[in-house]
Image (cartoon, rainbow, N blue to C red):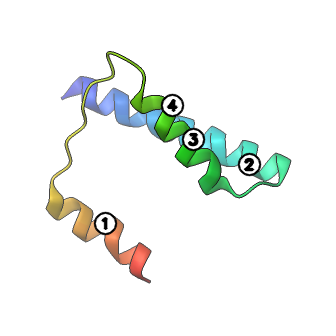
Amino acid sequence: MHHNLLLILCLLFVVFLLVMLAQRIRVAYPVFLVIAGLGISFIPGVPELHLDPELIFLFFLPPLLY
């Protein structure tokens, strides 16, 4: 559990840095997030992160649909 929390906090910090970088060079931040996600997916040894589908429906889907 501790390793998953550390992984999630590191990923949130990376997202924060990428959004700041995108604002500084005036590029849409989703471009950086997609590129970073692709880059992270190719790093060997990164643990798989499993999310409960109910959490996705409760926290992530409503803002996307709004």
Please, is residue 29 above or below residue 15 in the view?
Answer: below
Question: Which percent across, then down, holds residue 14?
Answer: 55, 35
Which quadrant of the structure image shows residue 27?
A: bottom right
Label 3 belongs to which residue? Answer: 35
Question: Which percent across, then down, holds residue 7?
Answer: 36, 29
Q: What whole-number distance in Å separates the C-alpha atoms at marks 2 and 1?
A: 24 Å
Please, is residue 25 above or below residue 47 in the view?
Answer: below
| Mark sitting earlier along the chain (2/4) | 2
Badge 2: how crowded within 10 Å, few (<14), some, or many (20+)? Answer: some
| Mark sitting earlier along the chain (4/1) | 4
Q: What whole-number distance in Å separates the C-alpha atoms at marks 2 and 4?
A: 17 Å
Label 1 belongs to which residue? Answer: 59
Tell me, yes or no, whether the two marked residues, 4 and 3, touch with CB atoms within 8 Å. yes
Marks 1, 3: nearer the viewer: 3
Badge 3: how crowded within 10 Å, few (<14), some, or many (20+)? Answer: few
Q: Quadrant of the N terminus?
A: top left
Q: What whole-number distance in Å separates the C-alpha atoms at marks 1 and 3?
A: 23 Å
Of the pair 34 and 20, the residue shown nearer to us: 34
Badge 4: how crowded within 10 Å, few (<14), some, or many (20+)? Answer: few
Type of amino acid at the residue the image marks with label 3 = Ile
Marks 3, 2: nearer the viewer: 3
Label 2 belongs to which residue? Answer: 22
